């Protein structure tokens, strides 16, 4: 199988892979690299389940070609925890029961991480706006918003 050779950085580690010209970054992450945290919810960029951060920008990996990752820095849900120590957002999602089926959770966590990197003290409205690209069919959004508020507070205090 001939393909496009790509060199990139994923969660701080250099990675090289071959992909087809029409293969999405989501497909590469899940099927070639075994990083299955990002989920395909819609395939059209409408649900946010496949959210990752590319060069500091939140993107839907279903809308990015795998070949476009050349030379980029990619952050996925797999890179959020520090070994066995959960990221404060992950811990607060658990504490606030801000998840049910879990399909949307990685996307929400990545979006919240991106939001708090840009705005460490967001209002409820800013949190809701910052997470608006992510859809949840199970929990509603109040527990998610409270978890992000609590995580933001804990991160500022640390």
Image (spheres, grey):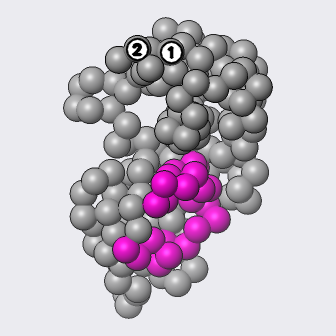
Q: Secondary structure at mark 2?
A: helix
| Percent of width and height locating residue 89 | 47, 24
Seen in the image, is 98 located left or right of residue 36? right
Q: Which mark is residue 153?
A: 1
Identify the image quadrant of residue 147.
top right
If the image is split into quadrants, where does the N terminus sit?
bottom left
- Residue 64 shown in magenta: yes
State the residue at coordinates (41%, 51%).
Answer: 75
Q: Which residue is mark 2?
A: 157
Can residue 113 be seen in the rendering of this structure? yes
Q: Are marks 2 and 1 in contact (CB under 8 Å)?
A: yes
State the residue at coordinates (58%, 68%).
Answer: 64
How crowded is the residue under tag 1: few (<14 C-alpha within 10 Å), some, or many (20+)?
some
Task: Check the image and report above or below for 41 versus 98.
Answer: below
State the residue at coordinates (24%, 64%).
Answer: 14
Seen in the image, is 22 located left or right of residue 133? left
How crowded is the residue under tag 2: few (<14 C-alpha within 10 Å), some, or many (20+)?
few
Task: Check the image and report above or below for 132 versus 155.
Answer: below
Q: Which residues are magenta?
A: 50-71
How many tags in the picture? 2
Most extreme residue toward the top, as rendered? 95
The foreground one among 75 and 135 is: 75
Task: Check the image and report above or below for 41 versus 125.
Answer: below
State the residue at coordinates (31%, 75%).
Answer: 7
| Percent of width and height locating residue 94 | 48, 15
Between the C-alphas of marks 2 and 1, the distance is 6 Å
| Percent of width and height locating residue 20 | 48, 81
The foreground one among 114 and 42 is: 114
If the image is split into quadrants, where does the C terminus sit?
top left
Seen in the image, is 100 located left or right of residue 79? right
Q: Secondary structure at mark 1?
A: helix
């Amino acid at each position: 199988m001939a393909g496009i050779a790509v060199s990139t950085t994923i969660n701080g580690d250099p990675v090289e892979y071959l992909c087809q010209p029409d293969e999405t970054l989501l497909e590469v992450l899940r099927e070639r690299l075994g990083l299955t945290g990002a989920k395909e919810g819609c395939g059209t960029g409408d649900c946010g389940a496949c959210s990752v951060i590319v060069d500091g920008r939140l993107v839907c990996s279903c809308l990015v070609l795998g070949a476009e990752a050349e030379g980029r820095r990619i952050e996925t849900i797999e890179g959020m925890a520090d070994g066995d120590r959960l990221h404060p957002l992950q811990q607060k999602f658990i504490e606030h029961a801000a998840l049910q089926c879990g399909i949307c959770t990685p996307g929400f966590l990545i979006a919240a991480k991106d939001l708090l990197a840009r705005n460490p003290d967001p209002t409820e409205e800013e949190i809701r706006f910052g997470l608006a690209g992510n859809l949840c069919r199970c929990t509603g959004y109040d527990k998610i918003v409270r978890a992000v508020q609590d995580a933001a507070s804990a991160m500022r205090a640390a």
